Amino acid sequence: MALIIDSHAHLDDPKFDEDRVQIIESLKESGIELVINPGADRPTSEAAFELANLYDNIYAAVGTHPHSADELTDKDLDRYREMAKSERVIAIGEIGLDYYYDNSPRDLQKEAFIKQMKLAEELNLPVVIHTREASGDTYDILESFKDKVYGVMHCYSGSVEMAKRYLDLGYYISLAGPVTFKNSRVAKEVAAAVPIDKLLIETDSPYLSPEPKRGRRNEPKHTLYVAECIAEIRNMDLDELIEVTNENTKRVFNLQ
């Protein structure tokens, strides 16, 4: 079977503190070719950057998640700009809007999102987008950067109709463990509807473990369950799905 790219995992998360090195060093044996590790704030972006510099099979994205939008400073942006000079940093993210938890005020979320979109435009880098219960405002901001910035709608949880609007802006759609859940009708509809050349797969480790691993810590090797589920939904050969989604990941993140 082809090795899989996990297009979004947080291997810097404390849940991996006890066995991080073991997991990373066994990625290939576990069926994983590469992992893309996004930051969620300055400290986690630094951690992702450090991992990407230590291991050839990890790349980093740097950025501030909407949960921490009220903490974003100009010094953080300068540091992201500095880290992005490295070929180990391949995107700005994860950034966006989260109106489900509202951990930061919505006006500050939008402000931080726009600042980081401008940074991605300046650096000519793709973005990794987090959006939850905020599709309208997320779309409006992405549309304002149309033809200037593109990227990935990570762990996509919206409708088919909204996915088509993001696709029209040039974005890719990435699906994670929730597509495997028994009650995930909409996610399965998205998995069937997204053009195969615009689809990515991920774990969002250590969160959102797929069936049959729900309730346990998620890991990059569990990307296989996501791939198997989508291949079944699309009536595709599993190896073909893996190869195509790998190529999509390399294309969107400019990986050779």
Image: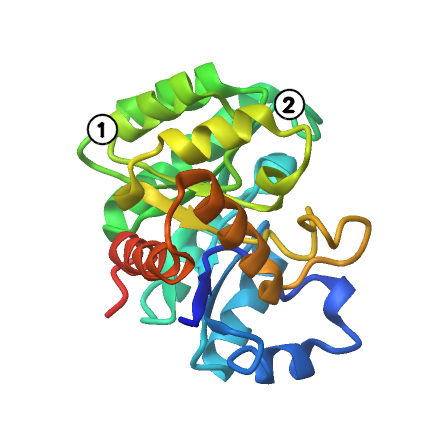
Quadrant in which residue 33 is drawn:
bottom left
Quadrant in which residue 106 is drawn:
top right
The C terminus lies in quadrant: bottom left
Residue 138 position, x and y percent, is: 44, 23
Where 48 sits versus 123, above or below? below
Residue 149 position, x and y percent, is: 26, 39
Residue at the far left in the pictured view: 147
- Which residue is tagged 1? 146
As drawn, is 23 to the left or to the right of 9? right
- Which residue is tagged 2? 105
Near-viewer residue (12 or 248)? 248
Q: CA distance from mark 1 to mark 2?
A: 25 Å
Residue in the image at 36% along x and 18% along y: 140
- The amino acid type found where label 2 is placed reads Pro
As drawn, is 214 to the left or to the right of 190? right
Residue 165 position, x and y percent, is: 32, 21
Residue in the image at 38% along x and 71% along y: 88
Indicate the secondary structure of the residue bearing disc 1. loop
Residue 18, numbered circle:
none
> Nearer the N terminus, badge 1 or badge 2?
2
Near-viewer residue (132 or 194)? 194
As drawn, is 180 to the left or to the right of 15? left
Where 171 sits versus 101, above or below? below
- The amino acid type found where label 1 is placed reads Lys
For label 1, the crowd category at 10 Å Cα-Cα, with few meaning under 14, some 14 to 19 and many 20 or more, is some
Q: Is residue 42 visible?
A: yes
Near-viewer residue (253 or 32)? 32
